[in-house]
Image (spheres, rainbow, N blue to C red):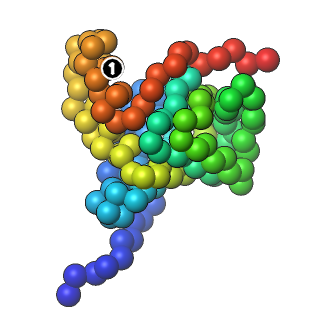
């Protein structure tokens, strides 16, 4: 009999190892019929995500370890363990590790799902693909990632 639930041990799930973070997809689009994706993101020392928004999906972040600075609609917020931030669709945001932290860990929920498919696609990219601005722009648009600029300066 096929089980209707999913159980993952720590460190399990489709994982993507990047220079500045290590992401585990815990619950994928296929698991939820596209309703949401749940990921564990392990941020590394040089992590910084520039200003962007998503037209069609919302993001929820729950900080597990460390400290993460979020820029949301002009406000800087320092999120420590236990903090939860929900960013609705069409809200500009960015994030980076808080000063003095070299790592952090957070859960991320994307609703509806889709970000897991973006990660799977760019995991196949070569250095030349990442350098191809036209390809990157098409990939961003395909996956509802609207780039608005670099990480805004912190006060």
Residue under pointer 1: 137
Considering every residue shown, the one lying at the far bottom of the view is 1
Q: In which quarter of the image is the N terminus?
A: bottom left
Left/right placement of residue 118 relative to residue 43 reads left
| Residue at image location 45% in from the left, 60% down from the top | 10
* Image coordinates for residue 100, horizontal then vertical, percent: 72, 27
Left/right placement of residue 137 relative to residue 50 reads left
Question: Relative to residue 86, is residue 31 depicted above or below?
Answer: below
Question: Relative to residue 88, is residue 47 depicted above or below?
Answer: above
| Residue at image location 68% in from the left, 51% down from the top | 84
Left/right placement of residue 136 relative to residue 22 reads left
Residue 14 visible to an observer of this rendering: yes
* Image coordinates for residue 21, horizontal then vertical, percent: 47, 34
Q: Quadrant of the C terminus?
A: top right
| Residue at image location 55% in from the left, 15% down from the top | 150
Residue 127 visible to an observer of this rendering: no
In this view, the residue in front, 117 or 91, is: 91
* Image coordinates for residue 89, horizontal then vertical, percent: 53, 41
Count the labels in the image.
Answer: 1
* Image coordinates for residue 13, horizontal then vertical, percent: 35, 56
| Residue at image location 30% in from the left, 33% down from the top | 142
In this view, the residue in front, 80 or 133, is: 133
Crowding at dot 1, Cα within 10 Å, few <14 / some 14-19 / many 20+, comes out as few
Question: Relative to residue 79, is residue 137 depicted above or below?
Answer: above
Label 1: element kind? helix
Choose top left, top right, bottom left or bottom right for residue 134: top left
């Amino acid at each position: 009999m096929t089980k209707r639930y999913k159980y993952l041990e720590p460190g399990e799930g489709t994982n993507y190892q990047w220079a500045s973070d290590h992401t585990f997809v815990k619950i994928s689009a296929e698991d939820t019929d596209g309703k949401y994706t749940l990921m564990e993101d392990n941020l590394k020392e040089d992590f910084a995500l520039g200003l962007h928004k998503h037209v069609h999906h919302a993001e929820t972040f729950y900080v597990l370890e460390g400290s993460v600075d979020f820029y949301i609609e002009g406000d800087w917020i320092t999120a420590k363990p236990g903090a939860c931030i929900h960013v609705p669709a069409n809200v500009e945001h960015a994030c980076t590790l808080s000063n003095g932290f070299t790592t952090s860990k957070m859960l991320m929920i994307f609703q509806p799902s889709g970000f897991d498919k973006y990660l799977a696609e760019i995991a196949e990219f070569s250095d030349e693909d990442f350098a191809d601005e036209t390809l990157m722009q098409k990939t961003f648009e395909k996956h509802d990632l609207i780039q608005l600029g670099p990480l805004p300066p912190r006060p």
